Image (cartoon, rainbow, N blue to C red):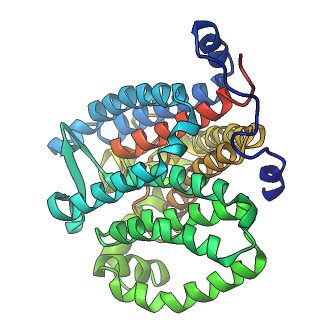
């Protein structure tokens, strides 16, 4: 990855930008990655269909509203994607300090005025529609970190550069952890690691952070909520708490009973008879596997794989380190969420509450991911000099 970044010219060394005009704008949109956009839309439609199945016949008003809300967020999110693609990503990089201050303010506002949800987690703000600032933070921190790393691009051999990058994400990550949201906190740390590795992290620094991480585990454990600890205990010892393990067991039954082609759309017994809880969010992969079988579940992986391929292609063809790092950050988000979401459905990882990208019900997550796709499209559209 580092070699890919180092082949790129530093920001601002390319040909000067000419005055924008209709012809130049049209040529920019000719570089738009329609494959990435098309596969993303297919995933969203796939998700809407599975949410419709998972919430079919629901009597709870929140579940009944999930499908129309997901469609609403999808429409808004696609608009956000096109708007973001139309903005030069270098302008967003130049505004990174203001973005950082806005993000910290937003997360601080959640601590004061945030709405509490399930398990008492205080994560939401209402601005006409409910939004989860911790979801937005995932991609805004990618912009902030990418700008910092490209500015320090030739100083990655210095520990100070790495520590400053960690400091950038430290305050937002701590505010998110205290909401509490352990899953998103870990996702942010994973994204940070991938981005500094892509920028040229030295092996000696990796060893140092491994040691620091191990020493910090007791402090992290002491600050975790009881239900978060319960999820880990349930993963380690499934028989220790049968109530906590109930839904994981139902997920395994759902996946195992789907077979090769599944029981048929809208015909899953575990989901339709409501044995499987939170089937529209955390365990939607189990619904897919039960109703559409191995074929349907594999299709999701193939589609997400294509999205990751196109994002990494954008990182490769980007004209500067900033563009490459933005794409690495977006790819890290999508990859980590996919692995964790499917892993907890298969009982290979503890339950964290992270959504399956573009599929699970979750408006803030969908908006954020589409914003990330917009960032990638902005990089792709500007990888050539357009006069």
What is the total number of numbered labels drawn onto the structure image?
A: 0
Residue 180 sits in quarter: bottom left
Q: Which of these two is toward me, 378 or 54?
A: 378
Task: Identify the image quadrant of the N terminus.
Answer: bottom right
Q: Which of these two is toward me, 207 or 95?
A: 95
Q: Is residue 307 left or right of residue 200?
A: left
Percent of width and height locating residue 350: 47, 71
Percent of width and height locating residue 137: 41, 54
Percent of width and height locating residue 18: 66, 19
Tell me the residue at 67%/31% (across/down): 380
Q: Is residue 253 above or below residue 319?
A: below
Q: Is residue 195 left or right of residue 340?
A: right
Q: Is residue 37 above or below residue 223?
A: above
Tell me the residue at 53%/67% (across/down): 189
Q: Is residue 227 above or below residue 75?
A: below
Task: Identify the image quadrant of the C terminus.
Answer: top right
Q: Is residue 267 visible?
A: yes
Q: Which of these two is toward me, 298 or 197?
A: 197
Q: Is residue 25 above or below residue 122?
A: above
Q: Is residue 263 visible?
A: no
Work out which residue is located at the far top of the displayed protein and give it: 23
Tell me the residue at 58%/64% (across/down): 192
Percent of width and height locating residue 250: 41, 61
Tell me the residue at 65%/26% (across/down): 381
Residue 75 sits in quarter: top left
């Amino acid at each position: 990855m580092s070699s890919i970044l180092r082949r790129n010219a530093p920001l601002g060394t390319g040909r000067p930008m000419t005055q924008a005009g209709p012809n130049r704008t049209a040529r920019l949109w000719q570089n738009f990655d329609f494959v990435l956009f098309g596969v993303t839309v297919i995933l969203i439609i796939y998700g809407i269909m599975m949410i419709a199945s998972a919430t079919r016949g629901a009597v709870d008003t929140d579940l009944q509203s999930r499908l129309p809300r997901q469609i609403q967020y999808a429409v808004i999110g696609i608009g956000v994607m096109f708007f973001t693609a139309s903005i030069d990503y270098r302008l967003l990089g130049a505004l990174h300090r203001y973005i950082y201050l806005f993000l910290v303010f937003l997360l601080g506002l959640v601590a004061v005025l945030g709405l509490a949800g399930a398990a008492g987690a205080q994560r939401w703000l209402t601005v006409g529609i409910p939004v989860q600032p911790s979801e937005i933070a995932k991609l805004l921190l990618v912009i902030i970190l990418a700008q910092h790393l490209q500015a320090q691009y030739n100083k990655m051999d210095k520990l100070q550069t790495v520590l400053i990058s960690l400091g950038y994400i430290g305050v937002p990550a701590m505010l998110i952890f205290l909401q509490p949201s352990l899953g998103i906190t870990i996702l942010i740390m994973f994204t940070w690691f991938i981005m500094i590795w892509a920028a040229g992290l030295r092996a000696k620094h990796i060893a140092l952070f491994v040691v620091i991480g191990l020493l910090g585990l007791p402090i992290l454990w002491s600050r975790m909520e009881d239900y978060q600890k319960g999820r880990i205990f349930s993963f380690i010892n499934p028989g220790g708490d049968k109530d906590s393990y109930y839904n994981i067991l139902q997920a395994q039954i759902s996946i195992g009973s789907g077979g090769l082609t599944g029981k048929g759309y809208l015909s899953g017994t575990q989901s339709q008879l409501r044995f499987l809880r939170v089937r529209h969010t955390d365990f939607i992969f189990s619904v897919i596997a039960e109703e559409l079988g191995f074929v349907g579940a594999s299709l999701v992986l193939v589609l997400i794989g294509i999205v990751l391929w196109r994002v990494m292609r954008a990182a490769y063809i980007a004209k500067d380190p900033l563009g490459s790092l933005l794409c690495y950050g977006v790819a890290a988000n999508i990859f980590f969420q996919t692995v964790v979401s499917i892993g907890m459905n298969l009982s290979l990882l503890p339950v964290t509450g992270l959504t399956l990208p573009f599929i699970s019900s979750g408006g803030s997550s969908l908006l954020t991911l589409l914003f990330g796709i917009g960032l990638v499209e902005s990089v792709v559209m500007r990888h050539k000099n357009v006069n």
